[in-house]
């Protein structure tokens, strides 16, 4: 029997990725593997994880971590933020070239036989994927203070990742596979033909759960399109979100669409404003 496996967010956890593929008993040329994106960053060995993707022909989608690097490559070096310079220093030449030549072709979603596959989720109130904002597809969690999947009806099951803090989700119509491997929890996968979940515990906690409040203290206050560059810099992630919601920090020439996203989900705007 040909089988299919959907694997959650890897974040460089190459050992756990190999282990879950072994546990599944992947048969080359017969089985198909999909993955929810965010193969890279945070974890121990993103290049090895990307090689596994390449060698086994794993069909993945683009995650917010991939997108940030792709956008950075399209930005002249002289315009890079401190955060981007730090990201660049952390990459080897191999990784940089692979992302430039291969990862940039990963799609934002895949309509697969058993499910729609997307990194973070779908934009409530929209019926066509083409009309949804890429930033939303790549980083939605809450929408008007409720989980996005409580506000979306889709004509087939939706499989997503990205929400490690929420963890494994299995409710009618939706499967969330990011169970926080890189944070020392587990890598999770689902096989529809067997209706079976696979799980591999993380070998260790590779990175602590992100403390956005602490991180934003060191973040530059002047972000792209900051409306009030002379104001007191925001100190916490919550403050950044509040100020984005209030319009104090916003994109210059914000479109009505962008303004809707900012109101419904300030964290999406915060992420794409450079935090
Ligand atoms: Mn993500």
Image: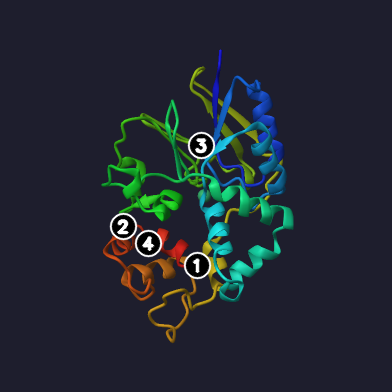
Q: Which mark is residue 264?
A: 2
Mark 1 surroundings: few (<14), some (14-19) or many (≥20) residues within 10 A: some
C-alpha distance separating marks 4 and 2: 7 Å
Which is in the foreground here, disc 3 or disc 1? 1
- Quadrant assignment, res 19: top right
Q: Name the residue tied to disc 4.
A: 266
**In terms of sequence position, does the residue under pointer 4 or pointer 1 come before the other?**
4
**In terms of sequence position, does the residue under pointer 3 or pointer 2 come before the other?**
3
C-alpha distance separating marks 4 and 1: 13 Å
The quadrant of the image that shows the N terminus is top right
Q: Secondary structure at mark 4?
A: helix
Q: Secondary structure at mark 3?
A: loop
Q: At which x and y percent is residue 175? A: 44, 33
Residue at 44 percent across and 64 percent down: it is: 270
Furthest-bottom residue in this view: 230
Q: At which x and y percent is residue 81? A: 57, 72
- Residue 267 versus residue 195 in the image, above or below: below
Q: Name the residue tied to disc 1.
A: 274
Q: Secondary structure at mark 2?
A: helix
Q: Are marks 4 and 3 in contact (CB under 8 Å)?
A: no
Q: At which x and y percent is residue 275? A: 50, 66
Residue at 64 percent across and 38 percent down: it is: 53
**In terms of sequence position, does the residue under pointer 4 or pointer 3 come before the other?**
3
C-alpha distance separating marks 4 and 3: 24 Å
Could you tell me if residue 146 is visible in this image?
yes
Residue at 55 percent across and 64 percent down: it is: 74
Q: Are marks 4 and 2 in contact (CB under 8 Å)?
A: no
Report how many numbered discs are placed on residues in the image: 4
**In terms of sequence position, does the residue under pointer 3 or pointer 1 come before the other?**
3
């Amino acid at each position: 029997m040909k089988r299919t496996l959907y694997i959650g967010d890897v974040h460089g956890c190459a050992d756990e990725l190999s282990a879950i593929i072994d546990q599944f008993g992947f048969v080359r040329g017969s089985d198909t593997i999909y993955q929810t994106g965010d193969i890279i960053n945070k974890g121990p060995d993103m290049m090895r994880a990307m090689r596994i993707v390449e060698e086994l022909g794993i069909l993945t989608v683009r995650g917010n971590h991939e997108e940030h690097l792709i956008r950075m490559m399209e930005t002249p070096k002289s315009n890079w933020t401190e955060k981007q310079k730090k990201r660049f220093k952390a990459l080897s030449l191999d990784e940089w070239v692979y992302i430039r030549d291969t990862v940039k072709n990963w799609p934002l979603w895949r309509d697969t036989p058993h499910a729609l596959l997307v990194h973070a989720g779908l934009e409530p109130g929209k019926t066509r994927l083409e009309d949804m904002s890429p930033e939303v597809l790549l980083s939605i969690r809450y929408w008007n203070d409720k989980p996005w999947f409580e506000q979306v009806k889709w004509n087939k099951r939706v499989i997503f990742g990205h929400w490690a803090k929420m963890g494994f989700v299995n409710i009618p119509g939706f499967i969330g596979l990011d169970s926080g491997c890189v944070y020392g929890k587990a890598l999770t996968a689902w096989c529809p033909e067997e209706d079976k979940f696979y799980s591999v515990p993380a070998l260790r906690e590779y990175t602590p759960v992100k403390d956005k409040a602490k991180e934003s203290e060191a973040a530059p206050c002047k972000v792209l399109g900051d409306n009030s560059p002379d104001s007191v810099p925001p100190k916490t992630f919550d403050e950044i979100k509040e100020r984005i919601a209030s319009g104090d920090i916003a994109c210059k020439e914000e479109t009505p669409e962008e303004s809707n996203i900012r109101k419904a989900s300030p964290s999406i705007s915060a992420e794409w404003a450079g935090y």
